[in-house]
Each structure stands twice: as structure tokens, then as C-alpha cells.
Amino acid sequence: MTTTNLRTIILCLVSLPLLPASAQTVVKLASHTARYDASGRLLPWTPLADALQREMNWYLNSPLDHGFPRFATLTFMDGNYAPVPSRPDSIPAMQNAMGIISYLKYDRFTHSSNPKLLQFARLQGDYIITQALTPDSGKYPLFPHSTGWRDRFPQPPGSGSQRDHPYDIEPDKGGIAGYALTLLYSKTHDARYRDAALHIARTLAANMRPGDATHSPWPFRADWRTGEARGEISGNMSYNLRLFDELASLGYSEFAAPRLALWTWIRDFQIPSAALNRHGRLWGQFFEDHDNDANRTSWAPMNLARYLIEKRDALDPDWRAHALQLITFVNQNFTRVQFGIAVCGEQDEDRHPWGGANTTWASVLALYSAATGDPQFLLTARQDLILAAYAIDDDGCPRDSVEHDVRGGWQEDSHTDVIHNFVDALTAFPDWAH
């Protein structure tokens, strides 16, 4: 099969929703009965803007633990704001950083109509910088913990959980946290957030290594005490790039050289590895609960595509072709039809459409369509976001996947890495909100 024919098949898969089996079929999606129009396209159970508002209101009523919203301090929470007893592990850096991004975007989307949104964004930032940093020593001092444990205030030096070793950190998760803190600084002018982001970026720059066809510029995991690497490939490099770019825009020219080295590696090695005739090796490893260099993810290439689309020529004169290449790589490897809708799986080792990865895919398809005027992914993006919103219950409590009957779950997949994706898509296509 030629590359052109394979690409055509992939694009057909994600461009055409399937009709329900019968007009009389009753389909349950989470707690809702699915609604379809006469052509068989899925309709929202409530307008998307209303679904988001319900979810945000539910989270703004979260209990506080040690002064922080409970969902900032744990990763597994049920539909009554209670910890899931069997899962004491947590992912503080990723979860709270994406939460900051989501809350700031939703605050802007709703014209700063509720001061509690910024308050909760700040509390998530405060949790990172006061409760979830390594000690001030070693190769990665005062660096965000990638994993930890609930009910630890602060996280202990050996906080590693899930597939991290006790003293592991994940450099890319520090980059996500640092970038989120720069956004929080720009919004609040609180120097604590800027200083923490600067320290994270300087630590990353000090530990950067040459990247090549088998090594990313940072390993996936490192012992914060010694810098010993574990996992030669870390697929998520776009947020380290965002962090360097954001600080450079604030006048910190020291990040020009590491930023250029990182972008050169992304352009010359990582993006080409997503070509249809390549194996995509440089997109391995992102999720904290997995430990396999060969485990490619959809999350990392789609988030790079998002950044290419946002920055366009300011980042990459070939942004359109590169973004489409990344989208096609994900479509080829991670998409399938479920509930009559094209959905995106999370990674090679887990093809389920978890909330974070699936809404990331849909939102980037929408952003690509808006930026290029190319409608090929437009229907797919809208249908998938409508499907994802079925995971939100009437009272606003979400599930971490529309597949699940249980309310709550992973808070990153339920909430913090979901809201910003909806906001991006609804900002690009305001009519989708209604």
C-alpha cells in the first residue's frame, strides 16, 4: 500500500462519524442517553458551554485540604470528593500544571466572571512550589515531583510512585510545571511563580544533553540526587520548549541557546520520526504509570502540533506540514471508532480514549482546521468533543473516560487536562458552545 493511499484511509476514518445501529437504538453514554440528529450525528446532552460550567462549578465546591483544593493534592477522587482508597499514588506536577493552564484559560473564556477561578489556579501553583518540590540539593534541586502520595504535606524526598523509583523525577513534567507557573506569573505578577519557573528552566538547561536519533535532550526519568538517567527517550519536549520561549519573552536571554538546541532536535529528529514510513520511536514515553521506551503516546505529538499551530511562522515556517504530519501519525496509530464516533487512544500500551488524550486530539484537530481553513477534521473534532462531554454528569462531576460507569477517577483525565482542550476548541469555533 502506498503512503498516499494509507493516508487517505486514515483521513477517512477520522472524517466520517458512523450512524447509530438503528433509530430505535438506546445508547447510554456514561449517565446520559445519547441523542442523535436525523443524519445519525451525535448531539450534545446539554450545550457544551453549559457542560463545562457545571463541571467547573462542581470543582469550585471542592473541599480544601491543608488549604488546597482536594483535587490538587491527590490524583484519584470519587464522585463525592472522597479519595479512592486503593489508589494513594498521585501525579502532582502534571496534574496541577495542566490545572493551572485550564483554570487560566477558562477564566479568560468566561471574561474573569468568577474570582474563584484565579484563586484555584493560584492554589494549584502554590501546591507545586510549597508541597511538591525536591529538596534543595542534588542535580535537580527544588524540582517538581512527577509522582507522589496523597496526604503528604509536603511530598517526601523519596516520593516516587507509580512507575517512578523513589527518587525519580521526570524532566518533562518539570517543564510543564515551569511553563504553567510562567503563565500564572504573567496573570498575577507574583514573583514567586516567576522565580520558581526560572529555577526549573535553569535546572533543565544545566542537565540538558545532546539529542540524536536514539536520545532526547533529557531522559524520561532521572534520579534527582545524582542525575542518573532512566529511559533514553522522553516524547514530550514541547513544554520544555514553551518554558524556554516564555522566559525568553520575559527578557531572560540565557535561554536562547538551549531553546535553539531543543528546537533543532525537535525539527531535525523528532518530527521526522513521525513520518508514515518511520517507527515513531522518538514519541515514546510520557505517562507516569508506564516504563517502556517503545511505548509511543498520542499526547506528546498532539501537544507539539498544538504549539506549532499556535506559534505558526514564529516557530516554524513549515508549521502547517509538520502539524499535519503529527496529526496523521496519531490518526494512523491511535484512533478507532467507538460509540459511532472516531476517538483517540492514549498510547501503544493503552488504547482507551481517556479524557486527557482524547480531548487533546479533538481540540488540536479543531485548532488545525481553524488555522488552515481545511475542513477535513472539523466534523470529527466536534463529534469527539460532544462525546467527551457525555462524561460530565448532571451535577458537573466528570468521569475520567466516557467508557466508565464510575464517577471521578484520575483527576488529570477527569478534569485538569480536559478543560483547556474544550476552551481551545470553543474559542476557535464559538458556535460549538451552544
Image (cartoon, rainbow, N blue to C red):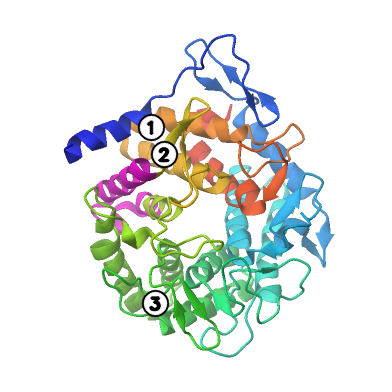
Q: CA distance from mark 2 to mark 1?
A: 8 Å
Q: CA distance from mark 3 to mark 1?
A: 39 Å
Q: Nearer the viewer, residue 68 or 346?
A: 346
Secondary structure at numbered mark 2: strand
Q: Tell me the amino acid under the disc marked 1.
A: Val
User: Which mark lies nearer to you, 3 or 1?
Assistant: 1
- Disc on the earlier residue, 2 or 3: 3
Q: Are marks 3 and 1 in contact (CB under 8 Å)?
A: no
Left or right: 77 with respect to 348? right
Q: Tell me the amino acid under the disc marked 2.
A: Thr
Q: On the image, numbered disc 2 is attached to which residue?
A: 335
Task: Where is residue 25? Give x, y as percent.
Answer: 59, 13
User: Which mark lies nearer to you, 2 or 1?
Assistant: 2
Name which residue lies at 43% across and 84% down: 206
Q: Tell me the amino acid under the disc marked 3.
A: Phe
Q: On the image, numbered disc 1 is attached to which residue?
A: 14
User: Which residues lie in the magenta part?
Assistant: 307-333
Name the quadrant containing residue 387.
top right
Q: How many marks?
A: 3
Residue 272 located within the stretch drawn in magenta: no
Q: Are marks 2 and 1 in contact (CB under 8 Å)?
A: yes
Q: On the image, numbered disc 3 is attached to which residue?
A: 255
Name which residue lies at 59% across and 9% down: 24
Q: Are marks 2 and 3 in contact (CB under 8 Å)?
A: no
Q: CA distance from mark 2 to mark 3?
A: 37 Å
Above or below, 66 relative to 118: below
Left or right: 293 with respect to 123? left
Above or below, 157 relative to 249: below
Pointer 1: residues within 10 angstroms few (<14), some, or many (20+)?
many
- Disc on the earlier residue, 3 or 1: 1
The C terminus, quarter of image:
top right
